[in-house]
Image (spheres, rainbow, N blue to C red):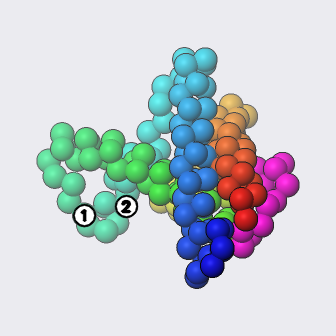
């Protein structure tokens, strides 16, 4: 087997994880930059989704102070999982092929946005139909940063093959 060949898609999965990690760093950085520039508070939707999931699954997160701390930790971890999973899915779907950067960036950003917001909507934590223009910009901007960073990393890694 030569460098870059894969058995059962393992190389694609690893490259997808790396691209997802870079994208997740980018979405976090874009979000924190937006919070800084606009002096806006952090979103509580990820912690609210953890609370709803715990309620639905009857998972006891402990006494309120501990539960609050666990929600604060689990919320971002769910986001990391979405970021990694989105890029791995992209890697498996593209089968290691480079995709033009603008196309890959939009596809990855949109997929991550849908993957993040669908469960939130299903749990009743948010409703995109009621979002303001600023709400949409606060969500689209960081997800585009995710898409661009993930796509650029994916294309760089796939160029090795």
What is the tally of numbered marks visible in this picture?
2
Q: Position of residue 21 (x, y in %)?
A: 53, 49
The answer to whether the residues at label 2 and label 1 have Cβ atoms under 8 Å apart is: yes
The residue at 25%/63% (across/down) is 59
Mark number, residue 97: none
Picture quadrant of residue 24 = top right
Q: Position of residue 96 (x, y in %)?
A: 72, 68
The residue at 66%/73% (across/down) is 2
Name the element at disc 1.
loop
Nearer to me, 116 or 125? 116
The residue at 37%/53% (across/down) is 50
Return the residue at label 2: 53
Query: Which region of the structure is painted magenta?
Result: 94-107
Magenta stretch: residue 153 in it? Answer: no
- The crowding category of the residue bearing disc 1, from other C-alpha atoms within 10 Å (few below 14, some 14 to 19, many at least 20), is few
- CA separation, marks 2 and 1? 8 Å
Picture quadrant of residue 146 = top right
Nearer to me, 22 or 138? 22
On screen, 36 above or below 124? above
Picture quadrant of residue 136 = top right
- Asked if residue 110 shows in the view, the reply is no
Nearer to me, 61 or 19? 19
Return the residue at label 1: 59
Relative placement, left or right, of 131 versus 53 is right
Name the element at disc 2.
helix
Nearer to me, 161 or 129? 161
On screen, 51 above or below 12? above
Of all residues shown, which one is farthest toward the left? 63
Q: Position of residue 140 (x, y in %)?
A: 70, 41
């Amino acid at each position: 087997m030569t460098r870059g060949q894969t058995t059962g898609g393992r190389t694609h999965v690893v490259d997808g994880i790396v691209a997802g990690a870079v994208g997740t760093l980018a979405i976090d950085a874009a979000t924190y930059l937006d919070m800084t520039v606009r002096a806006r508070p952090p979103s509580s939707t990820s912690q609210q989704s953890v609370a709803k999931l715990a309620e639905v699954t009857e998972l006891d997160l402990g006494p309120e102070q501990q539960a609050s701390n666990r929600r604060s930790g689990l919320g971002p971890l769910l986001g990391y999982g979405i970021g990694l999973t989105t890029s791995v899915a992209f890697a498996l779907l593209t089968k290691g092929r480079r995709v033009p950067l603008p196309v890959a960036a939009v596809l990855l950003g949109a997929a991550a946005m849908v993957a993040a917001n669908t469960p939130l909507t299903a749990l009743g934590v948010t409703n995109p139909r009621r979002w303001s223009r600023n709400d949409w910009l606060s969500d689209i901007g960081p997800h585009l940063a995710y898409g661009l960073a993930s796509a650029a990393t994916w294309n760089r890694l796939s160029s090795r093959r």
